[in-house]
Image: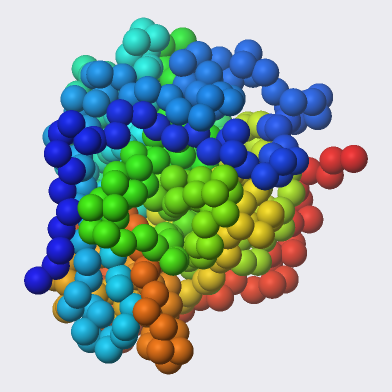
């Protein structure tokens, strides 16, 4: 029987953890204005973000209090359970202890409401009437649709076309919560029109959808943009996961040797690992941090660490991060939330400084792991989270072969109950593996900005 450690209400974390002041010295480079090449200021972001979130984006405070209104909504599903995967351990015949933090218990079925709720709250406070945003597999779009509904706001979601078609029930979920959902690229924005003129059959990408949502926000006075990953304030909000996990691991009388998560833009993994990374950076704890991504979109394992745009149409500031190039469009894999060309600057800096490792897997590898997990632990995981499961299984097998009693912690960032068509393809042997060609990556990288 799985061991669940539940926090009482008086022990719930009431602050988010900001890793910026604890980052290795000299590891962070400021976002740049693409026109001037100089560091951006608050005024460069004020057209699409409220000042409260801009303040969090650039904050050097180690902890930021969670507003009471946000805290009360969090309590609808938080704390999320920390579960010991005893049946998986038994199936693997491993001496390792495997724990997972399960974020699929949120109303939207993933970790995404952890930042959608505060982003909607701060925008509502600023007088914003509508949020424009993008979504890949639909987890972020559904979370923002939920959050805006809770605060009486409108929501427009530009959903990557391949996922729009693959995952109709995620689209339905957003519409139930009142959002308008559009298949990106659309003919509604100049960004979308440009992409469609070049490729009428474009499957879309997160970079394209971001361009459309940013344009929507920038051209309407009462509309702001909201991003579900990558930026500092988004990763900040997600640290509620790791702060809870630390308290729960303490209740279980354990502490991880390895902390694992999947990465697309980086927010779910940052949310779990940053509080533990604090122990490594400040206290010298010997912890391995392992980020798992798809071979079809190998941002960290094959991308370059350099300045690039966060979107395809080059409307965002330039950020120092691992990137495959802003016009990179990955194949239509089922882990739609991981189809992003770049990685959060904070995650990128931790990899670059040697504090975090990364690994890439094919679709068939991660679905094999997902099936084993579902048949042992009972939860059908999202394709994105299955990358973390695969990495955890690999580490547990390593421990078995070495005869070592290791403790492994990973983030199960969401359930896969709207991803059954992908499971159908795997079970019928029709799921394709993709390894993005090196020459295509080089071709995309040639188009990134050349600075200095």
Residue 1 visible: yes
The answer to whether 432 is drawn above or below residue 264 in the figure is below
Picture coordinates of residue 5 (x, y %)? 17, 54
| Residue shown at the point (67%, 18%) measured from the top left | 41
Q: Is residue 235 above or below residue 336?
A: above
Residue positioned 21% across, 47% down in the render: 80
| Residue 284 falls left or right of residue 425 | right
Query: Looking at the rendering, which quadrant does residue 122 occupy?
Result: top left
Numbered circles on residues, count: 0
Please determine whether, in this image, residue 139 is positioned above or below residue 180.
below
Q: Quadrant of the N terminus?
A: bottom left
Q: Name the residue furthest top.
A: 127
Could you tell me which residue is drawn at 34 percent across and 10 percent down? 125
In depth, the one of 231 and 335 nearer the eye is 231
Q: Is residue 311 left or right of residue 408?
A: right
Q: Can residue 297 be seen in this view?
A: no
């Amino acid at each position: 029987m799985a061991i669940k450690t539940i926090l009482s209400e008086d022990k719930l974390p009431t602050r988010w953890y900001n890793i910026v002041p604890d980052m290795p010295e000299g590891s962070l480079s400021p976002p740049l204005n693409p026109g001037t090449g100089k560091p951006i200021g608050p005024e460069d972001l004020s057209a699409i973000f409220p000042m409260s979130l801009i303040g969090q984006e650039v904050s050097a405070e180690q902890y930021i209090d969670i507003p009471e209104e946000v805290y009360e909504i969090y309590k609808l599903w938080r704390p999320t359970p920390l579960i010991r995967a005893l049946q998986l351990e038994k199936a693997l015949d491993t001496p390792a202890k495997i724990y997972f933090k399960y974020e699929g218990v949120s109303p939207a079925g993933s970790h995404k409401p952890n930042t959608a709720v505060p982003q909607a709250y701060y925008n509502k406070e600023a007088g914003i009437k509508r949020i424009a945003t993008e979504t890949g597999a639909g987890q972020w779009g559904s979370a923002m649709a939920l959050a805006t509904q809770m605060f009486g706001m409108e929501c427009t979601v530009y959903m990557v076309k391949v996922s729009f078609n693959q995952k109709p029930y995620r689209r339905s979920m957003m519409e139930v919560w009142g959002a308008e959902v559009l298949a990106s690229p659309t003919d509604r924005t100049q960004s979308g029109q440009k992409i469609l003129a070049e490729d009428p059959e474009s499957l879309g990408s997160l970079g394209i959808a971001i361009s459309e949502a940013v344009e929507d926000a920038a051209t309407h006075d009462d509309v702001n943009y909201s991003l579900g990953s990558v930026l500092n304030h988004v990763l900040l909000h997600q640290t509620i996961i790791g702060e809870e996990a630390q308290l729960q691991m303490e209740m279980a009388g354990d502490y991880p040797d390895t902390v694992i998560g999947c990465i697309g833009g980086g927010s779910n993994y940052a949310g779990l690992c940053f509080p533990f990374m604090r122990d490594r950076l400040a206290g010298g704890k010997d912890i391995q941090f392992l980020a798992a991504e798809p071979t079809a979109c190998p941002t960290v394992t094959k991308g370059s660490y350099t300045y690039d745009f966060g979107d395809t149409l080059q409307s965002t500031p330039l950020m120092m991060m691992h990137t495959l190039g802003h016009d990179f469009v990955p194949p239509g894999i089922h882990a739609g939330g991981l189809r992003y060309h770049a990685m959060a600057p904070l995650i990128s800096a931790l990899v670059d400084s040697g504090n975090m490792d990364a690994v890439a897997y094919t679709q068939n590898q991660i679905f094999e792991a997902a099936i084993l997990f579902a048949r042992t632990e009972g939860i059908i995981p999202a394709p994105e989270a299955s990358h973390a499961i695969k990495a955890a299984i690999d580490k547990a097998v390593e421990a078995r072969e070495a005869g070592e009693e290791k403790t492994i912690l990973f983030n199960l960032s969401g359930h896969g109950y709207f991803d059954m068509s992908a499971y159908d393809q795997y079970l019928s042997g029709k799921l394709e593996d993709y390894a993005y060609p090196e020459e295509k990556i080089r071709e995309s990288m040639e188009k990134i900005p050349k600075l200095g």
